[in-house]
Structure formats: structure tokens, C-alpha cells
Image (cartoon, grey):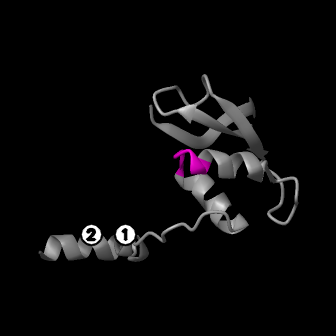
Amino acid sequence: MSVVIRLARAGTKKRPVYHVVVADSRFPRDGRFIERLGYFNPLLAKDNELRLKLDMEKVKSWLAKGAQPSDRVARFLDAAGVKKREPRNNPEKAVPRKERKAAEAGK
């Protein structure tokens, strides 16, 4: 069984709130989960302490059991200093689209 720590969407239309949950990777995004670890409210300001709330004791215990965090949750854990996240490298994204198209046509 592959266990992941990920976000499950809640809230209403155009007003999202996400629960940070531990779930089996085969379960749907907003479906069944094993345990709720906290919440994330993207509508609040980035400096607001109510934007993200995590129970770090539970998170650490699930990471010790082998749970894999999703990309977004890994960013939260990296900011909290719990788990180091490897930076991604996508040099194509830094090049403007017109220049990428011109380079592809020139090949």
C-alpha cells in the first residue's frame, strides 16, 4: 500500500480550502483518507499564520512510516524545515514561448 500526504479540496465554488491528509494513493483526491493532518487556505495572505496549519508530530510520524508527500506538501515541509525538497530544473520554462518556437523551427 502506497501512502501519500496530499491536499484534499474542500470549500465552495471559487473559495477553495484544502485539508492536508494522509491517504492511500489509489483513493480519489477528495475521497477516503486515513488521517487529517492540517489545512491550507490559499485565499489568505502569505504572511498570515492561519494560511497553513499542520500537526508536525503527526507529519513526522507518517514520514517515518514511509509516506511520500506530494509536490505542494513537500514545499510546505521544506519551508517548515521538516523535510528537504530537491529543487526542480526546467530550463525550457525560462525561455519565452516565441523563442522556443523559433528554436524548434530552426532545428
Q: How many marks?
A: 2
Q: Which image quadrant for residue 106?
A: bottom left
* Position of 49 relative to 17 (above/below): below
Q: Nearer the viewer, residue 16 or 31?
A: 31
Q: Secondary structure at mark 1?
A: helix
Question: Which contiguous range is marked in magenta?
Answer: 63-70
Q: Residue furthest left?
A: 107
**Quarter of the rendering occupied by the C terminus:** bottom left
**Quarter of the rendering occupied by the N terminus:** top left
Residue drawn at x 48%, y 33% is 25
Residue named by callout 2: 101
Residue type at the position of mark 1 = Arg
Tag shown at residue 64:
none
Residue drawn at x 82%, y 53% is 51
Q: Nearer the viewer, residue 3 or 50?
A: 3
Specify whether residue 64 is painted magenta.
yes
* Position of 26 relative to 107 (above/below): above
Tag shown at residue 97:
1
From mark 2 to mark 1, how far is it between C-alphas? Answer: 6 Å
